């Protein structure tokens, strides 16, 4: 399924084949939490902005509308009308970050819904069943995401439990994929590396999950409070133990600079809410750096957000117009800016791929890592 | 500019030629208050949903971003990227409905901005200058919109003042259209019939403004509190005195049934925020009647909002999906529903035009006036 096409240093150029189509890596996944990109973008808009993979959140869809509803509607693809690959997270991260009054046991986690306080139990089997109901292309294993900094003893204990959960995820997915009523009988399973910021826990964990021959390997529990140097270090620690012939996914990361640096350390796949969230506040990525469109200096600025950008927003609208829409609280401001920022991210990864193809990734990295993350 | 093509009873089929293109009447104008349709629709979306004419609000654009900013950006067409006809209202309605602490004198109205309380003065000349700055296709005369019910003596006095203001509007527009720096030197002026719910005031006023040879005639001050029968009656009272060879515009009206009834009484042009506002709350017009998408019964409904509708929303998305988006507070819900409701309105007017062309308007009216306004 994953084919490694070319490397430059640790940076990898590959492709990932699925029943819902093949995507080129390194790739950025566009986050549609509840089955829609925040900022009024539909599945058809995703096509326009170069999205290859959509990501949806298992926890959110379980709470609303309920995975049974999505299943009855034929699964996420039919429900949202996105026909490309979809990755669903396991719900683990949201259970640990959003839900209230959670209790962790060996079986799984009890918690109260953030929407209506309703009691919910989720363990490895429940997570797999929900993701099977959703019919996503790729399911993520149910894990505990420990906040950084974490106690060594707790991180170790949590890591061991997450490994046992992974075994149960694998067994349950195998069972679900063999059922006649399952929407996507080829659903793939990615394991998640944990171990907080401890080198030995991280590498031991990666070695053990690598033996399980999963469809892909994620690095979880980063970008949750630690400095970026620590994040880069952990990637470099676990990378040698991640199977070369499997896709590697760095969860929830990050800025354009973070992504370029992670690619240079051997990561293939990314997701982050930052481009869409920042866009909704008028903070926009450009090839010259980050701009804040609320700034008075853009009041009469007839140029597009990024003159070098080919997105539908930059092809048509001025900074002046979009700034005005923000000042009036018009939703169109958010839509136009989310379109731009996501196009920027998808295009950034396209440029990363081109540079690996051309053997110019090192130059690309030198030129862009700092610049793209700088506020101008 | 207005060409009457065909009639059936009092219903009229025509076309209106402007420097920004020709539109077919009866027509519905889509309201982009601040230069964007609420619900995250851009000028390009308007093309998709059959919009012929965009309407923007002079008062709102004067307050934000300021008509001087729009002028500096090349006018509303360049600013919003809508290249078809644009009608701007005069600001009068908003001054009388939104602004605070207003004082009316012969020169005009002093009031405080609803955004920041800033003191503003607007009279006929100011309204014309702002609309000239905006560069709209059609400017509306500055009038006082009296709430119903109104005292006879006040309505009469107000009506006389609005007539004097109309003379000043005409003179000021003539002057502005002759200036070299004016964006649209062919800006058109529509007068507005007032007179509250008094037959004699209404008809006397229409007779007098008809003599002024304006580019079109609006009926204002309706749908502001009076029963619909009163509105229909007033239209029938003034219609005989409105020039046959000029377009007639019923301001701020209304439901599908209201529009069909007004067409049957000789009206050519409409605008209303109802379709977009109702859409944002999940209240949707269909050819079978009005549905509320928040209703639990649509939770697993795979059919589109209106199975007989050809809009981008109905071609692609289910009631179940859109209802879910509303429940999650996803902006996409509003966008998809505004697209549907505006398409419905633009298409309704297209069907009205077709029925006049085919001589079947009476049947169309009998079949639809009641049905389309019924909640189902």
Image: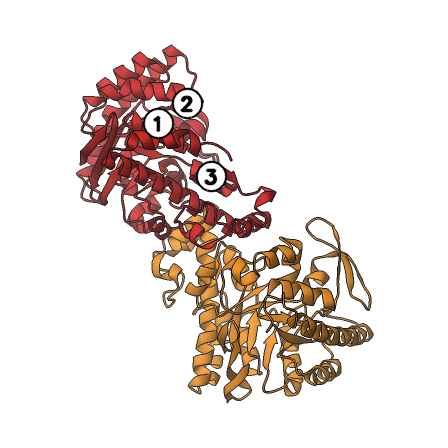
Chain colours: A red, B orange
| CA distance for labels 1 and 2 | 10 Å
CA neighbours of label 2 inside 10 A, class few (<14), some (14 to 19), many (20+): some
In percent of width and height, residue A131 lies at: 29, 38
Viewport quadrant of the N terminus of chain B? bottom right
- How many numbered callouts? 3
Q: Chain of mark 2?
A: A
Q: Is residue B309 above or below residue A4?
A: below
- Cβ–Cβ under 8 Å for marks 1 and 2: yes
CA neighbours of label 3 inside 10 A, class few (<14), some (14 to 19), many (20+): some
Provide the residue designation for mark 1.
A261
Q: Which residue is at 70% across, 53% downward?
A: B114
Quarter location, residue A130: top left
In the rendered structure, which disc, 2 or 3, sits on the residue that comes first in sequence? 2
| CA distance for labels 3 and 1 | 22 Å
Q: Nearer the viewer, residue B124 or A338?
A: B124
Please tell me whether mark 3 or mark 1 is closer to you in this view.
Answer: 1
Provide the residue designation for mark 2.
A228
Provide the residue designation for mark 3.
A277
Q: Secondary structure at mark 1?
A: helix
- Do the residues at pointers 3 and 1 share their chain? yes
In percent of width and height, residue B97 lies at: 70, 61
Please tell me whether mark 2 or mark 3 is closer to you in this view.
Answer: 2
Q: Tell me if A171 is positioned left or right of B179 in this view.
A: left
Q: Which residue is at 41% across, 49% downward?
A: A41
Q: Tell me if A134 is positioned left or right of B250 in this view.
A: left
- Do the residues at pointers 2 and 3 share their chain? yes
- Do the residues at pointers 1 and 2 share their chain? yes
CA neighbours of label 1 inside 10 A, class few (<14), some (14 to 19), many (20+): some
């Amino acid at each position: 399924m994953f084919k490694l096409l070319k490397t430059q240093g640790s940076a990898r150029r590959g492709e990932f084949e699925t029943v819902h189509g093949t995507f080129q890596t390194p790739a950025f996944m566009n986050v549609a939490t509840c089955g829609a990109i925040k900022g009024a973008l539909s599945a058809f808009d995703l096509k326009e902005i170069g999205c290859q993979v959509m990501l949806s959140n298992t926890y959110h869809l379980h709470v609303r509308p309920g995975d049974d509803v999505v299943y009855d509607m034929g699964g996420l693809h039919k429900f949202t009308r996105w026909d490309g690959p979809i990755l669903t997270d396991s719900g683990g991260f949201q259970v640990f970050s959003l839900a209230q009054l959670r209790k962790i046991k060996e079986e799984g986690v009890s918690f109260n819904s953030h929407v209506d306080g309703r009691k919910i139990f989720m363990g490895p089997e429940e997570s797999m069943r929900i993701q099977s109901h959703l019919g996503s292309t790729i399911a993520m294993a149910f894990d505990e995401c420990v906040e950084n900094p974490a106690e060594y003893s707790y991180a170790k204990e949590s890591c061991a439990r997450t490994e046992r959960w992974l075994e149960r995820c694998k067994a349950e997915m195998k069972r679900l994929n063999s059922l006649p009523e399952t929407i996507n009988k080829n659903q793939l399973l990615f394991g998640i590396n944990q171990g907080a910021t401890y080198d030995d826990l991280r590498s031991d964990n990666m070695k053990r999950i690598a033996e399980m021959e999963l469809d892909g390997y994620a690095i979880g529990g980063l970008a949750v409070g630690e400095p970026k140097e620590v994040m880069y270090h952990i990637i470099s620690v676990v990378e040698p133990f991640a199977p070369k012939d499997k896709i590697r996914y760095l969860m929830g990361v990050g800025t354009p600079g973070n992504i370029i640096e992670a690619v240079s350390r051997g990561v293939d796949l990314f997701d982050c809410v930052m481009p869409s969230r920042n866009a909704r506040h008028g903070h926009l990525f450009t090839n010259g750096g980050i701009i804040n469109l609320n700034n008075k200096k853009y009041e009469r600025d007839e140029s597009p957000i990024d003159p070098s950008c080919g997105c539908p927003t930059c092809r048509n609208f001025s900074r002046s117009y979009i700034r005005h829409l923000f000042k009036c609280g018009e939703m169109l401001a958010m839509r136009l800016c989310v379109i731009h920022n996501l196009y920027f991210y998808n295009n950034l990864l396209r440029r990363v791929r081109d540079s690996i193809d051309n053997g110019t990734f090192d130059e690309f990295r030198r030129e862009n890592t700092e610049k793209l993350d700088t506020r101008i």
